[in-house]
Amino acid sequence: MIDQINLREFESIYEETYNQISKYIVCHCSNLEDVNDIIQETYVELYRILLKGKIIENIESYLVGIAKNKIRKHYGLLYKLKEISLSSNKKEENDLLNQIPNDVDIEKIMLEKADIEVIWNYLKKKNSDIQRIFYLYYNLDFTIKEISEELNLKESDVKNKLYRTLKELQKNLRKGL
């Protein structure tokens, strides 16, 4: 019963704070590929704290503190331990494949993922402002005005960077990047 109360409380906090915390993490990460991991780590840490029964006065600033520590920790360990393969044996891999429902169009999903990967690889070659603008605009559904305020840029600069890069993407995608 107490776990259900904590879970409901956590879900409520998550919904109320997700955009602000995501925005903070996006604006403070040096590599946008790390954003989702750091967001997840931040909220897992919060959930652990809630399970212990700790009462938090200002949840948003508390979460920003957790996020700040996670970012600092992530970049301290990042280059020491790059990546470990998750599927180390074939049995685990086959078990995962058998769990996929039959009505899932894997080919379509893979093509969409490949397109997204091509676009993201192209964006990684751009400066960090452009990467942040795209992430905030397309992943977090921020308006151009909100992005300009968060990144301390003029709205016209945000628009120019967004639309100019979109034109480049369209042109280069037609050519096959």
Image: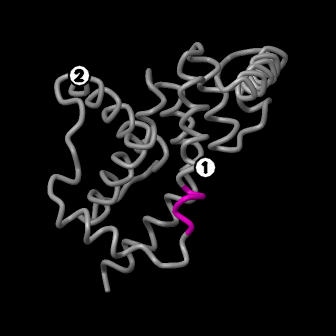
Instruction: Name the spot of residue 107 as percent of width and height, x first.
Output: 55, 59
Q: Residue furthest bottom?
A: 1
Most foreground residue, 167 or 110? 110
Q: Amino acid at mark 1?
A: Glu
Q: Is residue 108 magenta?
A: yes
Please state the extent of the stretch shown in magenta in the rendering. Answer: 105-109
Residue at x-position 72% and y-position 25%: 169
Please report whichever mark, 2 or 1, sits nearer to the chain's N-terminal start.
2
28 with respect to 67 (left or right): right
Q: Quadrant of the C terminus?
A: top right
> Which residue position holds label 2?
79
Instruction: Name the spot of residue 71 as percent of width and height, x first.
Output: 35, 30
89 with respect to 93 (left or right): left
Q: Amino acid at mark 2?
A: Tyr
In terms of image quadrants, where is residue 131?
Answer: top right
Residue at x-position 77% and y-position 37%: 143
Q: Is residue 122 magenta?
A: no
Mark 1 Cα within 10 Å, few/some/many (few <14, many 20+)? few
Residue at x-position 45% and y-position 69%: 9
Whether 66 is drawn above or below 111: the answer is above
| Residue 148 seen in the figure | no
> Which residue position holds label 1?
112
> Could you give the CA–CA distance between mark 2 and mark 1, rounded to whole angstroms?
30 Å
In terms of image quadrants, where is residue 79?
Answer: top left
Please, what secondary structure does the residue beneath circle 2 have? loop
Q: Residue furthest right?
A: 156
Instruction: Name the spot of residue 125 as percent of width and height, x first.
Output: 55, 16
Secondary structure character of the magenta stretch overall? helix
In terms of image quadrants, where is residue 30?
Answer: top left
Mark 2 Cα within 10 Å, few/some/many (few <14, many 20+)? few
Residue at x-position 23% and y-position 50%: 86
Whether 101 is drawn above or below 162: the answer is below
